[in-house]
Image: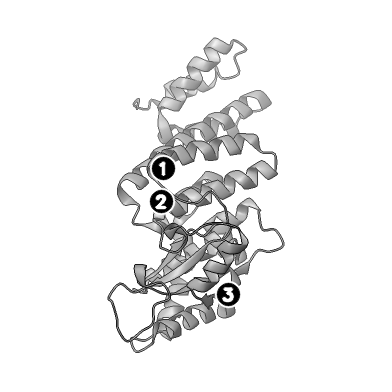
């Protein structure tokens, strides 16, 4: 990355409205090479510009820098920090909201977590813990599935879901799982086709409880999109039968955090495709490439 000389940058910005494509492409490349550090200078130039072409080109360069930075951050997350689901989910939100206030999102989650902590105790059974989470999330904080606008892109961004209290099965499950795990409750996402669910996983081999799916230590499953309904393996069996799909353990066992972020991006790609936003479809596909999809296995279905 080049070192930043503000006067030099301003001189380059003044040439961005040049009609010669070769000059413009050269200047554009130089500005992009500066990375995030040049964005404040570009934004200041945009606010003082009266030339629509110059403003449009500045906007495109800022977006290019933000997008390339996001791709780099996402690849780094997948390679080394993918155990942090919240960070991965925030990175995806930055795609639509580059200036996202992450601390605000974390504060919103911490408020819910505190409410949960006050209601939970160590003597509770797993089912009782889930009933408490359901009460706090779906009755106290009024989260619900966005059935009226199921495929809207905002259902896939954690900040908008926290603001509107509405989301798709995946984002509601992610919020549910993040909060549960912060409270040491082992609830993880399961990549079910055409839906996304949660599993309460107890790998301690407890002989005092009945496992619905012993092979993976699953006590029961949870449907966050249906206000935390608890169900068993037989319900998944029936669901897959209706879809005419054969047994595959990935439909029953917890998936990785990278799989969940991949699925957010696949959902977004589908949403943008329905809206005819082909540029955003292409960009979400680029973000998917950052997660090295050839090394991961998850179902093709969305939501």
Q: How many marks?
A: 3
Q: Which residue is mark 3?
A: 227
Q: Which residue is mark 1?
A: 291
Instruction: Please indicate, yes or no, whether residue 115 appears anywhere in the rendered image.
Output: yes
| Helix, strand or loop under label 1 | loop
Tell me residue 192's x, y (percent). Answer: 51, 60
- Determine the image quadrant of residue 102: bottom left
Residue in the image at 41% along x and 32% along y? 35
- CA distance for labels 2 and 1: 7 Å
Q: Which residue is mark 2?
A: 258
- CA distance for labels 3 and 1: 31 Å
Q: Quadrant of the C terminus?
A: bottom right
- CA distance for labels 2 and 3: 25 Å
Q: Residues within 10 Å of mark 1 (few under 14, many from 20)?
A: many
Q: Earlier in the sequence, mark 2 or mark 3?
A: 3
| Helix, strand or loop under label 2 | helix
């Amino acid at each position: 990355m080049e070192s930043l000389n503000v006067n030099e940058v301003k001189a380059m910005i003044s040439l961005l409205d040049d009609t010669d494509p070769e000059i413009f492409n050269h200047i554009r490349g130089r500005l992009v090479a500066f990375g995030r550090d040049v964005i404040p200078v570009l934004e200041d130039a945009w606010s003082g510009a009266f030339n629509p072409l110059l403003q449009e080109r500045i906007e495109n360069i800022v977006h290019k820098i933000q997008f390339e930075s996001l791709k780099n951050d996402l690849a780094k997350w997948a390679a080394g920090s993918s155990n942090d689901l919240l960070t991965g989910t925030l990175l995806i939100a930055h795609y639509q909201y580059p200036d996202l206030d992450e601390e605000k999102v974390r504060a919103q989650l911490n408020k819910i977590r505190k409410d949960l902590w006050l209601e939970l105790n160590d003597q509770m059974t797993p089912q009782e813990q889930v009933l408490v989470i359901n009460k706090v999330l779906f009755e106290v904080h009024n989260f619900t599935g966005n059935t009226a606008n199921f495929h809207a892109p905002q259902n896939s961004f954690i900040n908008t879901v926290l603001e509107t209290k509405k989301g798709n099965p995946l984002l509601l499950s992610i919020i549910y799982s993040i909060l549960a795990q912060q409270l040491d409750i082992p609830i993880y996402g399961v990549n079910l086709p055409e839906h996304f669910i949660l599993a309460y996983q107890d790998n301690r081999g407890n002989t005092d409880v009945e496992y619905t799916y012993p092979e993976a230590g699953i006590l029961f499953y949870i449907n966050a999109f249906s206000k935390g309904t608890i169900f068993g393996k037989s319900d998944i069996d029936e669901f897959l039968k209706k879809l005419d799909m054969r047994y595959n353990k990935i439909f029953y066992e917890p998936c990785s955090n990278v799989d969940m972020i991949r699925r957010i991006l696949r959902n977004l790609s589908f949403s943008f495709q329905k809206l005819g936003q082909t540029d955003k479809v292409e960009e979400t596909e680029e973000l998917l490439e950052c997660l090295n999809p050839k090394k991961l296995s998850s179902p093709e279905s969305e939501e």
